[in-house]
Image (cartoon, helix red, strand yellow):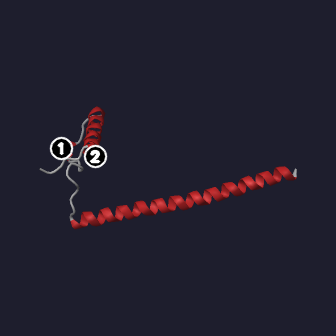
Amino acid sequence: MTALETFFSSGLTLLSFALVIFAAYKIFQIGTDVAEMKQLLKDIRRGVSMPEGRAVTVSSQPTSAEELVRAVHAASYEDLDEIASPRKPL
């Protein structure tokens, strides 16, 4: 019976340790997200504009799910093209 108790005790100890590490990781992750949100709010208050082509206006929103999928694919392929073959200034 002592071997079984030792096994459960060790397992619970490891599980508790893993949960504490996971909780600390999530807290730092949430802190990073909050810091990014604060920076975005500061930029909005200063009037910093979004990069061209990134902002979605009311008139350019897709009206159906199919149009949304096409818009996402088109945007991602354009980004990949720019990364793969950057345009050199003339």
Residue 80, labelled with which disc?
none
In front of the other: 2 or 88: 88
Distance in Å between CA atoms under marks 2 and 1: 28 Å
- Give the residue displayed 77% in from the left and 55% down from the top: 9
The answer to whether 80 is drawn above or below residue 18 in the figure is: above
- Give the residue displayed 43% in from the left and 62% down from the top: 32
Label 1: which secondary element? helix
Where is residue 70 drawn, in percent x and y?
Answer: 27, 34
Q: Which residue is mark 1?
A: 59
In front of the other: 21 or 86: 86
Most extreme residue toward the top, as rendered?
66
- Give the residue displayed 31% in from the left and 62% down from the top: 40
Label 1 neighbourhood size at 10 Å, few (<14), some (14-19), many (20+)? few
Where is residue 55 drawn, in percent x and y?
Answer: 23, 50
Q: Quadrant of residue 62?
A: top left
Give amino acid for label 2: Ile
Give amino acid for label 1: Ser
Label 2 neighbourhood size at 10 Å, few (<14), some (14-19), many (20+)? few
Q: Which residue is mark 2?
A: 83
The answer to whether 35 is drawn above or below residue 60 in the figure is: below
Q: Quadrant of residue 35?
A: bottom left
